Amino acid sequence: MEMDEDGVDSQRDQSSDSLGDFLEKYIELDQLGEGGFGFVFSGYRVEDKLPVAIKRIPKDNVFVWMFQDENGRELPMEVAVMLEMGNLSSALWQSAFVTLLDWYDLDEHLIIVMERPMPSDNLSDYLMEHNGCLKDKKAKIILKQLVEAALYLQNANIFHRDIKVENILIKTTAEGLQVYLIDFGLSCFDDRREHELFCGTPDHFPLDWYINTNYRAGPTTVWQLGVVLYEIVHRHLFQTSNFLSKKLKISKKLSKNCQDVLTKCLRVDPEERPTLEQLLNHPWFSYCDSVPIGGFDCQNISHIFQSL
């Protein structure tokens, strides 16, 4: 079997129905997290001690089972998406997404085994370790990598649907921060159509779904990136309900370009939000802006509700 330079299998399309196969190949350790669909544990691969993340999902909680593979097996959507990502080999894929190593279709559970970048924390914990928010310069580094990852998915016709701080890993390296977008449990293949059933975090529902009860992948992804940026640079969480009640505020301590990115990503009309390509070309990602000095001062952004 081919291995990449990190010891990760380059062949990721094999699965097993045997719990014994899993127990022989991997050691499961402490619980890392719990979500609405299952649990994630740390662990390692027996043969080479490669750190892994092990996701256990009760069969009843598997969001979507999709088409059959060449062997006639039904694939969970999450597995199908990650296999497709693995087939689209590129330097960006290797640096922005974790690798699917194995998956096990057991009687009561689906087990998904992925590489675990080390050392890393999810962005939510990383923010807590940095007093709840990040400075403009570091926020820019993180968001630019997220925009690049989202653009990669868009070009592969993959819609993540649940980009949020809990689904982002931050790996600290000698060269700086490396960002991984994780958890494709709600993802789907996108054909540029409108979606009606919203899948994701309720506090982050895009306004287009509230207003029109439908949404599209591109504008929704840009909205979710705006939500992530808002939570990175403020010490409180984003809630669409606060947005609707016009209580959302942007700190004036942020650079003008950072404020501009936030305002544009969170525009009410999805047609007025920038595309991912336009977002990546925003001046904020090209120039280092000076950050105003002084106490916390917020501007109300209620002007963006004028179209309601």
Image (cartoon, rainbow, N blue to C red):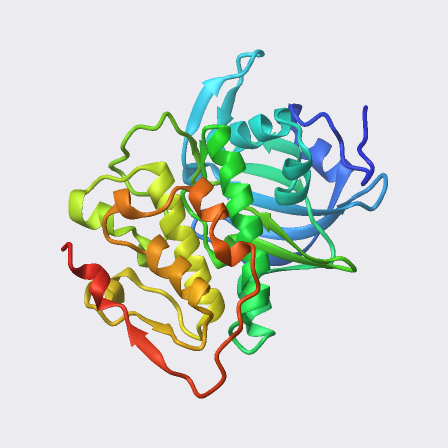
Residue 66 found in image quarter = top left
Determine whether 168 is above or below 70 in the image: below
* Residue furthest to the bottom: 295
- Where, quadrant-wise, is the C terminus in this rendering? bottom left
From where the camera sits, is residue 193 visible?
yes
Between residues 114 and 98, which one lies in front from this camera angle? Answer: 98
Q: Which residue is found at the position 61% from the left and 26% from the top?
A: 88
Q: Which residue is found at the position 76% from the left and 47% from the top?
A: 44
The location of residue 155, given as percent across then percent down, is 49, 30
* Residue furthest to the right: 48
Between residues 27 and 297, which one lies in front from this camera angle? Answer: 297
Determine whether 244 is above or below 101 in the image: below
Residue 190 located left or right of residue 112: left
The location of residue 11, given as percent across then percent down, is 72, 25
Between residues 298 and 84, which one lies in front from this camera angle? Answer: 298
Q: Which residue is found at the position 40% from the left and 42% from the top?
A: 161
The location of residue 27, given as percent across then percent down, is 75, 46
From where the camera sits, is residue 125 visible?
no
Determine whether 87 is above or below 293 in the image: above
Residue 106 located left or right of residue 239: right
The location of residue 209, given as percent across then percent down, is 23, 46
Between residues 78 and 301, which one lies in front from this camera angle? Answer: 301
Residue 215 located left or right of residue 72: left
